[in-house]
Structure formats: structure tokens, C-alpha cells
Image (cartoon, grey):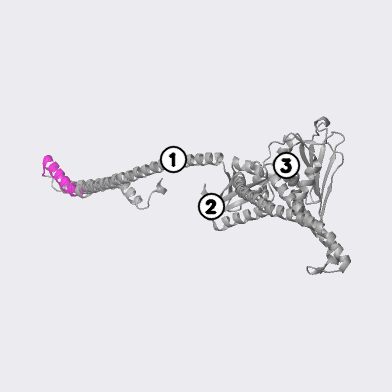
Amino acid sequence: MSSSQPAAARPERTKLIFAPIRLMAILILSVFAIEMAVMIALSRMPQLSVVAANFIDATSLVTILFPILYFSVQKPLLQLLEDYRGKERELLGHREALEEKVARRTEELTAAVARLEQEAAERRKAEEALSESEDCFRRIFEQNDDGIILFSQSDGAIRDVNPAAEIIFDCDRDTCRARGVTRFCSRDGGNTLQETLDELRDHGGDLQIPRLTLALPDGTERLLSFRGKVVQLRGEKILYTTFHDITRRVRLEEEAQQMQGRLIHANRMTSLGMLVSSVAHEVNNPSNYIMLNARLLKGAWDDIAPLLEERYRETGDFPVGQSSYGEMRGILPELFDGILDGAQRISSIVENLKRFGRDDRTGSEVPVDVNEVVSLACAILNHYVARYTRNFRIEPGEGLPRVRGNRLQLEQVVMNLIANAAQALSGPQGQIRVTTSCDPGSGQVLIQVADTGCGISPEVAQRIMEPFFTTRLDQGGTGLGLAISANIVKDAGGTLDFQSVPGEGTVFTLRLAPVPETAHPNA
């Protein structure tokens, strides 16, 4: 313990230990010296009594011991007392300072504890708010109808995928995180998405892709809209990206555009029908006038030809118009026949147009000759088909039974099939062949329209009979031809099917039930 005390305290301790010994030594020596001196003095004064000697001895002892005791005992004691009081006052001051310091430190500690409690309460509230916010975010993240994928900004790795994204990309969370979403997009779409993600990682901001093509593992495609931005999540910068499936919306918009185009086309067709009807009526009148006058002229020629022939024999050749009778005598009958034949053809075409445009609802149960149907349809479309090919053949069968149906509607079906075949050809070297025959197995009457065109892809073949489905909307197609044709054939108790090889051609087969022989004995 002594070695650990301060060096300044050691003299004080030594002083306190040897002070009583010194005092005792002083007292003993003083008493001894005084008594010796008194005894020597008294020995020289024998006449003094004992009382006087004792009085002198005591007086001398007190007189000499008093200063010794004062300076050796009382004064040090008084000094010690004063030092004690000073130390006490100093100790009291230190105590008051210590109490003040303790009070101040207590106040500081109390304030610090209050601050800590307040900070702890605020931290608890912040943690509760953060937990509530995370729970809210998780609920929104899990229940959102849009696909949400979180990417790390630092390395671009996928951090999380919500259930909607799993449905959109048709894969679970682990597969998405392992493969990455760009692998599910088409080549162009994947490149665009990757470039957008890289730009987000490098520059941040709010970027979007209005239309993105997604190729699923099963081969189907979906259309997505993409949007992404950088957010702070748990102290880490995250690319927050959303994928919205717009496939249905885009399809509806395309169908609406197609519907609008079809309505416009239908309106044009209505106007065209009215125009055709008007033109047919206007053409029919001069055609009848030409035919009537041509017959009159031919009759007049037949009457005057013998007279002109007699003059020719008698007087020789003579001028007729800008030629001579010798040249015109064989040409004029042919000219009259040509005028009559042309007028008859004009009348036939006009009649066919009028019959085709006429709303005939009374002939649905009339026996129909399929060869006549095919012949009329080909005659109407002959000029149209000539624009697409030089190889248009008609091969009618012989001895075919008649079928029951609406002749004009069946003509419409055949015309639609021939028009489609012509449009499928790639050039004038392509071929169209229309045949009629009888299936010996089923007894059905067949009308086949075959072409060597581009064929029909499997995707188009699945929807080709749907109303308003067309691959030639920009060329005026309405998507109604085959749908209406299929309904017409079905109402007639038949079927309409096809076989196609892409790149080689297509064969449409119209199968109709024959009418029993007793139904048309005069056929």
C-alpha cells in the first residue's frame, strides 16, 4: 500500500509517527534538567523549609515547562486544529463542488437518458413504420397485376420477381433469376430491353418501352409494355421494373382498326353495288339499241345483197364507202354478225351482273347444275383472273347430278374461291384449275378450286374461317368471304374444306349433296 501512495504524503506520515516520541523526549529531558537545576539550587540553600523548597521546585518546573509545552504541544495542536478546519473547509468546498458536479452530471445523464429513450422510441417508430412500409410494399409487390422484377444496380442481377411476372414469363422465380428476362424476349426486343436496363444502371432516370415482344418457351408470343426506374431499397439502389401485358389491348386495337377498315370497305362495296347496278342499267339500253339496229341492218343487207350482187355481175365492181363491193361483199355479213354477237355478250354480262346483285331468297330449294354455276362464275371473273395468270383452266365433269341450293349464293362461293386463288399466285406463270366431279364413295358433287400459289401457313389455317380474319386488309380484304361461303355451303347441307402446302399451293373443295333423280325428271 505504501508504495502506491504519493511521495509527498510520506514526510507527513513520518512526522505524525515521530511527533509523540519527540514530545516525550523533550518533556523527559526538560523535567530532568529542571529538577536537576532546582535540586542543585536548593542544596545551596539549606535554610529553606520543605514547603518553600517544594514551592520553588513546582514554580520553577511550571515556569520552565509552560513555554516548552506551549511551543511543543499547544501551538502545534492549535496549528493542527487550524489546518484541520482549513482542510474541513477545503473538504466542504470540494464536497459542494463534487455535489454540484454530481448534480450537473446527473442532469446531463438524465438528459442523455431522456434523449436515448426518445431516440429509442423514434427508432422503434421508424422500425415499425419501416416494417409496415415493407409489409405494404410486399403486399403490393405480391398482389400487383403487372409483372415486377427488381434488379441490382451494381451487377444487374435479379433480386426478386413477383407472381405476376412468373405468370407473364411462364417460369418460376428461380428460373427467372438464373436465366434473366432478356432470354425470354425476341431478338430485337431482348436487345432493346438490355440496352434500356444498361442505361438505367448507368444514368438512372425513368425509362419505358411502349411495346416489347415476349417469346414464351411454348412458342406463343405476348406483347408487353416496360417501365423502369432506380429506387432506394434497404440501403441498396435497385432497378424497379414493371412489365404490363398489352397483348389483349393491342389485339383489340388491331381488331378495331380492321373493323373500321371493313366498315369502310363494306360502304365502298355498297356504293360499288349501286354503281354497278346503275351502270348495268345504263349499258343495257344502248346495248339493246345496238342489237335491235344490228338486226335491222342485217335484215336489210339480206334483202339488198341479191340486188347488189346482180349489179356486180352486170357492171363489175363499184365503190362502197372507202372500199369496193368486191372486198366488202364477204366482210359485211361478218361485221353484222360481230355486232350482234358483241351486243348479245354485253347483254349477257349485264344480265349476269343484275342477277348476281339481285337479292334472291326464293331459290334455296331449286335443283342447281354445278357446271352452270362454275361457268357463270368463271365468265364473270374471266377478265379479273386474266390480270393474275395466263393458266386458268375449267374442267367440268359430265353427267353430274344436280344439287339443291341457291344458285346465286353458290355462284358467290365459287367466285370467292377463284378470286382468292388468283390473289395467292406469285406471277402469271401460276395456275388455277376449277373442276367439277362426283365422289363415287359418298355420291357427293365436288367443286374444286386448285392453285399453285403461296399456300396457307398453319397459323393462318387455324383462323381462316373466322369472320373478319384476313391477311390482306391493306388490299381491301374484309375477312368475310370464306366465313360467308362456309355458312352458305353449310345451309345447303354441304361442307367446305381445304388442303394446303405452304409454298406449293392450295385446293379448296366444295362438297354438296345431290338431289334425288325424282326431284328433276326433266334434267
| Relative depth, front residue between 492 and 498 | 492
The three-letter amino acid code for the residue at tag 3 is Leu
Residue at 57 percent of width and 43 percent of height: 146
Seen as rendered, the residue at the extreme right is: 313
Work out whether mark 2 precedes mark 3 in sequence or the reverse, and give the earlier one: 2
| C-alpha gap between disc 2 and disc 3 | 67 Å
Res 312 quadrant in image:
bottom right
The three-letter amino acid code for the residue at tag 2 is Val
Q: Which residue is mark 1?
A: 124
The three-letter amino acid code for the residue at tag 1 is Arg
Q: Which residue is mark 3?
A: 408
Instruction: List x then y, in percent, for residue 116.
Output: 39, 43
Left or right, residue 135 beside residue 56 = right
Query: Is residue 140 in view?
Result: yes
Left or right, residue 174 beside residue 231 = right
Q: Which residue is mark 2?
A: 230
Number of other residues with Cα within 10 Å of mark 3, as a class: few under 14, some 14 to 19, many 20 or more: many
Instruction: List x then y, in percent, for residue 84.
Output: 25, 46
Q: Dominant secondary structure of the magenta stretch?
A: helix
Write down the region rendered in magenta.
47-68
The secondary element bearing badge 1 is classed as: helix
The secondary element bearing badge 2 is classed as: strand
Nearest-to-viewer mark from 1 and 3: 3
As drawn, the label of residue 496 is none
Is residue 56 magenta-colored?
A: yes
| Relative depth, front residue between 38 and 378 | 378
Look at the image and tell me in which quarter the N terminus lies. top left
Res 289 quadrant in image:
bottom right
Instruction: List x then y, in percent, for residue 107.
Output: 32, 44
